[in-house]
Amino acid sequence: MCGPGDDECEGEAADLEAGIWVRGVDYLSGWRDARKATAELGDALSLVGVETAGLRLPAASDTDGSGMVRLELSAASAREVAMLARVTAARLDRAS
């Protein structure tokens, strides 16, 4: 599990060899930014009551060095997040 309050993230070490590294690109800053974003997103999802038991938020760096967060969750939690997004869109008058 990789998410809020976790000191370690399973499988992240394997991601280090997953791509091609370009000399001069600051991947570490992007990864650090993504780690902060995972904590923010995890906290926000917890605040609105999304079940975090199956939640995975692995932090990574994209090919240009920018931070990237992948959101992995159960189908039930995905439906809950979708419903919350629709409610928020309606409140912001962005519903189509």
Image (cartoon, rainbow, N blue to C red):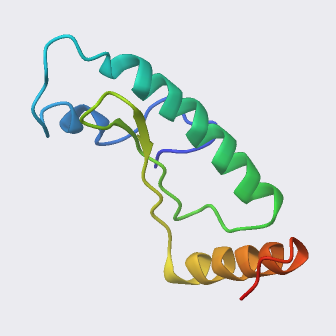
What x and y, as percent, mark residue 33? 52, 27
Q: Quadrant of residue 17?
A: top left
- Residue lying farthest to the bottom in this orientation: 96
Say whether residue 27 is left or right of residue 55.
left
Question: For the view shown, which residue lies furthest in the right direction?
Answer: 91
Q: Is residue 35 left or right of residue 14?
A: right
Instruction: Residue at 28%, 31% (x, y): give it.
Output: 64
Q: Residue at x 57, y 42 (%)?
A: 38
Q: How many marks?
A: 0
Answer with the quarter of the image where residue 66 lies.
top left
Residue appearing at x 68%, y 79% in the figure? 80
Rendered position, 57 above or below 8: below
Give the percent coordinates (x, y) of residue 86.
74, 81
Residue at the location (82% across, 56% down)? 47
Left or right of 92, for residue 41: left
Question: Which residue is more in the foreground, 74 or 84?
Answer: 84
What percent of the width, then of the height, locates residue 90?
84, 81
**Quarter of the image where the C terminus is located:** bottom right
Whether residue 83 sits left or right of residue 24 in the image: it is: right
Residue 28 vertical position relative to residue 44 in the rendered view, above or below: above
Horizontal and vertical percent position of residue 60: 36, 37
The residue nearer to you, when weighing 20 against 24, is: 24
Vertical order, 27 against 94 (above or below):
above
